[in-house]
Image (cartoon, helix red, strand yellow):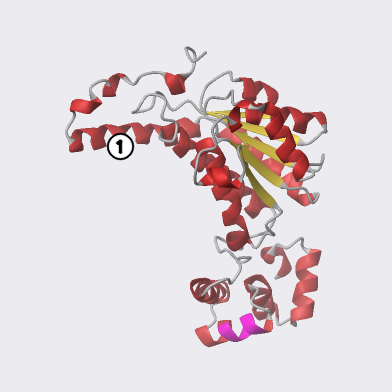
Amino acid sequence: MFKNLTTETRNEKTMNVDEMSTIELLTVMNEEDEKVAKAVKQQLPQIAKAVEAIIATKKKGGRLIYMGAGTSGRIGLLDAVECPPTFGTNPEEVIGLIAGGEQAFIKAVEGAEDRQELGVDDLKNIHLSDQDIVVGLAASGRTPYVIGGLEFANSIGASTVGICCNKDTVIGKIANISIEVVNGPEVLTGSTRLKSGTSQKLICNMLSTASMIGIGKVYGNLMVDLKLTNKKLVERAKRIVMEATSCDYETAECYLLKADNKPKIAIVMILTGLTKEEAIQKLAETQGFVRRAIK
């Protein structure tokens, strides 16, 4: 079953890991981690295809849905829950599904990943439509929960992406877009929370960040759609407005209040002299892109 999976192969550098000193072990781990970014780099063309597909999905009002089991599922969930505070999305716009349900995030639910029908059920429960895109994460590339979900998504016309850490995987063959990163054997044989997990996190970072940039959620490299949900983010929003407009702290604070604590609207108001209502209308006309709204 595992003989052709790189993720299950023993790493020749760590055959005597139990005899290494702490610094020797950490050095090997660091050297192995260095390989991850290079492996991800090889898949940039496929990652770019996935980003473009997500942008197309978002522009037509569809949702980005991550699904996976164990570490893979947790990484998808982590990316999903960070989108609302970072990009001002609604919680239902980017969704993370994990085999076994939300409780599986903190405690493994044994056997959940082995049932294809659970992947189908989870997508049906969120009313998956052909307007959505499903990103299946599975280090092995053969997790039944993800296979079931992707096959169901394909059957109703939704877009699909597979992120795996082996070559020529089952999931890679099912998904419309296949991202297969080969990081080499793990330091601990089969422990895919290590290099495999790191590569999946890097890819999810790219998918969400690049797609949100692609639909106008930033201005320059500033998070102009972030939600002001705590004191830290309130202060960050003020700095963002200051950076974007070269205004002082008091001006940023004032315009944020006028803009109902929405940095993007405050920035357009300051840079164009428009009222809040006019700035909102201008952003609507330019699909939310600040740079276009201020021209």
Residue 45, quarter of the rendered image: top right
Question: Horizontally, is 172 left or right of 189 in the view?
Answer: right
Residue sitting nearer the eye, 292 or 205: 205
Q: Is residue 32 left or right of residue 1?
A: left
Relative image position of residue 208 (x, y in whole percent):
60, 48
Residue type at the position of mark 1: Asn
Whole-percent x, y for residue 172 in the image: 63, 24
Q: Which residues are magenta?
A: 253-257
Q: Is residue 91 above or below residue 116?
A: below
From the viewer's perspective, is 67 left or right of 57? left
Q: Residue at x 60, y 86 (%)?
A: 254
* Residue beneath disc 1: 30
Viewer-side residue, 112 vs 11: 112
- In this rendered view, identify the residue nearer to me: 191 or 87: 191
Residue 185 is inside the magenta segment = no
Q: Secondary structure at mark 1?
A: helix
Residue drawn at x 65%, y 60% is 217
**Residue at horizontal 81 percent and vertical 41 percent from the top:** 129
Quarter of the C terminus within the rendering:
bottom right
